[in-house]
Image (spheres, grey):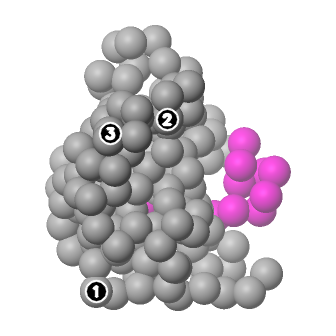
């Protein structure tokens, strides 16, 4: 698979799993795909485990946020779409019948992230990378 270091707006650019049992997920996906993990503490106190194949970061696994777990939402793989402006993307989703699940917010040193749902309820993340490449930005989380 070719290596990418930038993503055009509208292109899927990242995926991560939010789960209630990070260690079990790491064991499962590590065995299934041969992934190793680089555990990165976040400013919010959680650990964001970067999944790697050799030296390349390919995805991540993180604990499910308390609000999500409290609402009995099952573990979920998230897909992020590259956007040039997360705030404008959220506004456009809302203007077109979507629901803002999480307003655009800064991920220090990495970029801006938001989540929206289309009118049927399908959720997707928006990722506005900082001035550095996406893979480097995610590695800094």
Please report whichever mark, 2 or 3, sits nearer to the chain's N-terminal start.
3
Q: Earlier in the sequence, mark 1 or mark 3?
A: 3
- Marks counted in the figure total 3
Residue 5: in sight, yes or no?
A: yes
The residue indicated by pointer 3 is 94
Q: Which residues are magenta?
A: 28-42
Q: Earlier in the sequence, mark 2 or mark 1?
A: 2
| Residue 114 percent across, percent down from the top left | 32, 49
Q: Is residue 35 magenta?
A: yes
**How many residues crowd around disc 1 within 10 Å: few (fewer than 14), some, or many (20 or more)?**
few
Q: Write down the quadrant of residue 126 in the picture.
A: bottom left
Q: Is residue 74 magenta?
A: no
In the image, is 130 to the left or to the right of 76?
A: left
Nearer the observer, 117 or 79? 117
What mark, if any, has residue 118 been given in the picture? 2
Residue lying farthest front? 96
Residue drawn 38% across and 12% down?
A: 71
Q: Residues within 10 Å of mark 2 (few under 14, many from 20)?
A: some
Label 3: which secondary element: helix
Q: Residue at x 47, y 73 (%)?
A: 9
**Side of 117 relative to 12 (left or right):** left
Q: Secondary structure at mark 1?
A: loop
Distance from label 2 to label 1 (Cα)? 28 Å
Q: Which residue is mark 1?
A: 131
Q: Residue placed at 49% from the left, 28% from the top?
A: 119
Above or below for 109 versus 141: below
Q: Position of residue 10 (x, y in %)?
A: 52, 66
Compute the Cα span from label 2 to label 3. 9 Å
Categorize mark 3 by other alpha carbons within 10 Å: few (<14), some (14-19), many (20+).
some
* Location of the N terminus (image quadrant): bottom right
């Amino acid at each position: 698979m070719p290596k990418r270091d930038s993503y055009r707006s509208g292109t899927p650019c990242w995926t991560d799993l939010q789960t209630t049992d990070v260690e079990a997920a790491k064991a499962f996906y590590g065995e299934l795909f041969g992934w190793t993990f680089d555990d990165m503490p976040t400013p919010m106190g959680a650990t964001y485990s970067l999944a790697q194949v050799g030296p390349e970061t390919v995805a991540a696994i993180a604990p499910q946020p308390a609000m999500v777990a409290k609402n009995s939402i099952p573990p979920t793989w998230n897909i992020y779409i590259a956007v040039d402006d997360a705030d404008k993307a959220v506004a456009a989703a809302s203007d077109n019948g979507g629901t803002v699940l999480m307003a655009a917010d800064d991920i220090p040193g990495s970029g801006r992230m938001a989540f929206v749902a289309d009118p049927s309820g399908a959720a997707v993340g928006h990722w506005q990378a900082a001035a550095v490449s996406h893979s480097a930005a995610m590695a800094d989380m």
